[in-house]
């Protein structure tokens, strides 16, 4: 009867003009339904067109997938199924390296662990700060975790120089290292370079990000020119890369960004990319994005599993991404410059990831706890990151920008991390990127932020941290 009542209002011309609004609910159709409609039209217009589209998509997936790298070192463990299994979770290590001239070389500046659960359509992500301390199996010293890839490549190089077939490379060493720390199998990896990151965002027409404070930095040696103002805005590929890479600032150390800030921004931009790709406009660019991925992304996940994940997660937006809080903090001193995970936070991270991967803790052996600070280890100073929150939000909250030329104000809340209290009190602290009531990083005066770039470690004077063997590959420090 509701349908019969509406025509009685038609004599009024204005009402008649508004009648097309009845079709508005149809716009709410999910993009999967629109994709089915698109495929139906292709079939009607000619089955060959639909077949060509699927063939092109399949070919692009084949280009991205590289189960055995060119160096011949198998990065996927034997026995792992190559067929997509919709009832089993997948784990993947995501890394990013700056392959530009004067970039980071073999250092992995971006490291994230993701578990993909097809049953609950959930992706769980963990960001790993690049200065996180790690002790590798069979070694006596500590390393920063962003150097592990280079150390694995060194092992491969030494084997080749001896005329031996290498069994280890950067990817395999990274995987085994994270397995020892987290207690889950790291099945696959995905590596994307910064150029691919920029190109994908540009293809999408930019992504919307809420920049919370002014970021300014210039370095002519590598062509870095960062100039971002606060506020909600659409960033193109270049600007988005500036946003996630900002560390140093022209105005001095008080305006610098830490690894914690960069990790947070990386996840913000990933959420924005996912949301943009699941729009109708983003859907129409999937093939173009896959072409870009073919040039700039490599993974050892088999093609069938890539297709299965893309199919099962079609239309899922960033609300399905659960970012785990790592609680990491930085310790700086004469014998120690590392980022650490609190013991309780590391335990909760392991539990969350093992649950997603259906791993029973009692089946595991001794895990690598070197990413946490031991109770008996002496430190000189501690820096805590901004308080993080476990989030599944899809859009950044729009905040009023702070005064552009003022650094964030330091918090007066004392650190709760296990350490010897700092003697440098009462002096101005450096800022955090975070605002809106979240505490800033606590850092003693005279200490830098976590080291901007990995440099070969000098021999430690601490007997508990003997020096590791020197790397064969020399990396040029990042400037961004």
Image: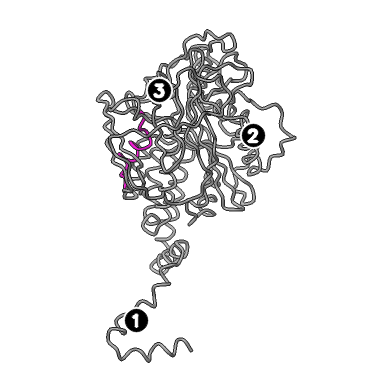
Report the Cα–Cα distance between label 3 and label 2. Answer: 34 Å
Numbered disc total:
3
Residue at 59 percent of width and 43 percent of height: 90
Identify the residue under disc 1: 19
Q: Which mark is residue 347?
A: 2
In the shown orientation, is residue 104 left or right of residue 33? left
The residue labelled by disc 3 is 427
Task: Tell which circle, 2 or 1, labels the residue nearer the N-terminal end.
Answer: 1
Decide which of 207, 433 is in the foreground and name it. Answer: 433
The reply to whether the magenta stretch includes residue 238 is yes
Q: Quadrant location of the C terminus?
A: top left
Please provide percent x and percent y for residue 58: 46, 49
Q: Is residue 330 above or below residue 304?
A: above
Could you tell me residue 2's position as x and y percent?
46, 86
Q: Which mark is residue 39?
A: none
Q: What residue span does the magenta drawing correspond to?
A: 234-247
């Amino acid at each position: 009867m509701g349908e019969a009542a509406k025509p009685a209002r038609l004599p009024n011309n204005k009402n008649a003009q508004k009648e097309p609004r009845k079709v508005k609910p149809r716009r709410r159709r999910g993009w999967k339904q629109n994709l089915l409609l698109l495929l139906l039209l292709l079939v009607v217009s000619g089955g060959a067109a639909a077949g060509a589209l699927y063939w092109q998509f399949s070919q692009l997936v084949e280009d991205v997938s590289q189960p055995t790298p060119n160096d011949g070192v198998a990065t996927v463990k034997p026995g792992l199924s190559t067929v997509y299994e919709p009832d089993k979770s997948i784990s993947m290590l995501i890394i990013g390296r700056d392959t530009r001239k004067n970039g980071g070389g073999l250092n992995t500046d971006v490291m994230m662990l993701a578990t993909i659960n097809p049953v609950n359509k959930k992706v769980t992500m963990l960001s790993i700060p690049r200065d996180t301390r790690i002790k590798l199996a069979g070694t006596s010293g500590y390393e920063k975790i962003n150097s592990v890839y280079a150390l694995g490549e060194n092992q491969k190089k030494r084997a080749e120089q001896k005329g031996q077939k290498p069994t280890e490379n950067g990817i395999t060493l990274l995987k085994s290292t994270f397995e020892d720390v987290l207690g889950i199998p790291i099945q696959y990896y995905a590596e994307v370079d910064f150029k691919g990151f920029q190109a994908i965002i540009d293809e999408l027409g930019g992504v919307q990000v809420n920049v919370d404070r002014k970021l300014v930095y210039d370095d002519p040696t590598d062509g870095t020119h960062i100039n971002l103002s606060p506020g909600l805005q659409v960033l193109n590929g270049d600007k988005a890369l500036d946003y996630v890479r900002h560390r140093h600032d022209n105005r001095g150390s008080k305006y610098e960004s830490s690894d914690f800030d960069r990790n947070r921004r990386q996840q913000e931009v990933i959420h924005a990319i996912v949301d943009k790709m699941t729009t109708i406009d983003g859907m129409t660019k999937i093939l173009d994005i896959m072409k870009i991925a073919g040039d700039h992304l490599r993974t050892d996940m088999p093609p069938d599993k890539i297709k299965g994940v893309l199919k099962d997660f079609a239309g899922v937006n960033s609300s399905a991404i659960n970012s785990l809080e790592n609680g990491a903090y930085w310790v700086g001193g004469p014998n120690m410059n590392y980022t650490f995970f609190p013991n309780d936070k590391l335990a909760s991270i392991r539990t969350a990831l093992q649950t997603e991967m259906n791993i029973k803790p009692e089946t595991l052996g001794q895990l690598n706890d070197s990413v946490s600070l031991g109770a008996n280890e002496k430190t000189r100073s501690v820096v805590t990151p901004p308080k993080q929150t476990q989030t599944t939000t899809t859009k950044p909250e729009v905040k009023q920008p702070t005064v552009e030329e003022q650094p964030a104000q330091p918090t007066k809340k004392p650190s709760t991390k296990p350490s010897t209290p700092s003697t440098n009190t009462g002096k101005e602290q450096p800022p955090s990127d975070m605002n809106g009531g979240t505490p800033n990083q606590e850092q003693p005066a005279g200490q830098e932020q976590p080291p901007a770039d990995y440099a070969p470690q000098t021999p430690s004077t601490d007997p508990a941290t003997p020096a590791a063997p020197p790397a064969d590959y020399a990396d040029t420090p990042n400037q961004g």
